[in-house]
Amino acid sequence: MYKELAKKYIKRITPQDIKNYASSINITLTNQEVNIIFNFLLKYYEDLLNKNTTVFNKLKPLIREDLYKQIITLYEENKNKYLN
C-alpha cells in the first residue's frame, strides 16, 4: 500500500518539498543539493521502493559525506517502517 502511495506522490514532488522536509528535520541543504536529491529521487524512486540500495552509489559522489549519511539513515528508518 505505501509503495503505491509513494509512486503517486513522487510524480507531484517539487524541489521545494525536499527543501521543506529537510528543514523540518534540521537538515540544511544548498540549492544545488536540493536539485541533486530531487533529480535522484525522480530517476531512482522505483529502485528505492524495491530496496535496491546500490543506486545510492550514484548519489554519494555528488553530495557532502555527512548529508549522504543522513540520507542513508533516513532511508533505512523509513524502509523499515513502510516497506517491510
Image: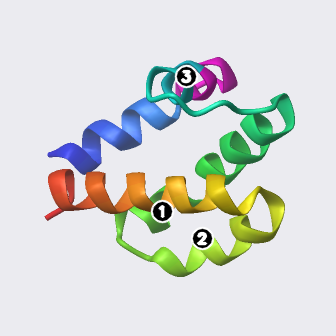
Q: How is the image coloured?
A: rainbow
| Mark 1–mark 2 distance (CA, rounded to whole Å) | 8 Å
Q: Amino acid at mark 3?
A: Ser
Above-or-below relation of 67 to 15: below
Q: Amino acid at mark 2?
A: Phe
Tag 1 or tag 3, which sits nearer the N-term? 3
Tag 2 or tag 3, which sits nearer the N-term? 3
Secondary structure under badge 3? helix
| Residue 82, horizontal then vertical, whole percent | 19, 51
Q: Which residue is mark 3?
A: 23
User: Residue 13, located in which quarter of the rendered image?
Assistant: top right
Left or right: residue 20 versus residue 29 is: left
Above-or-below relation of 37 to 14: below
Left or right: residue 70 versus residue 16 is: left
| Residue closer to the observer: 55 or 1 | 55
| Residue closer to the observer: 16 or 68 | 68
Left or right: residue 59 versus residue 32 is: left
Membership of 2 in magenta stretch? no
Above-or-below relation of 9 to 79: above
State the extent of the magenta-drawn residues as a range.
12-19
The reply to whether callout 1 and callout 2 are in contact (CB within 8 Å) is: yes
In the image, what residue occupies the spot 59% across and 74% down?
55
| Mark 3–mark 1 distance (CA, rounded to whole Å) | 17 Å
Residue 72 — which label?
1
In the image, what residue occupies the spot 57% across and 33% down?
27
Q: Which residue is mark 2?
A: 56
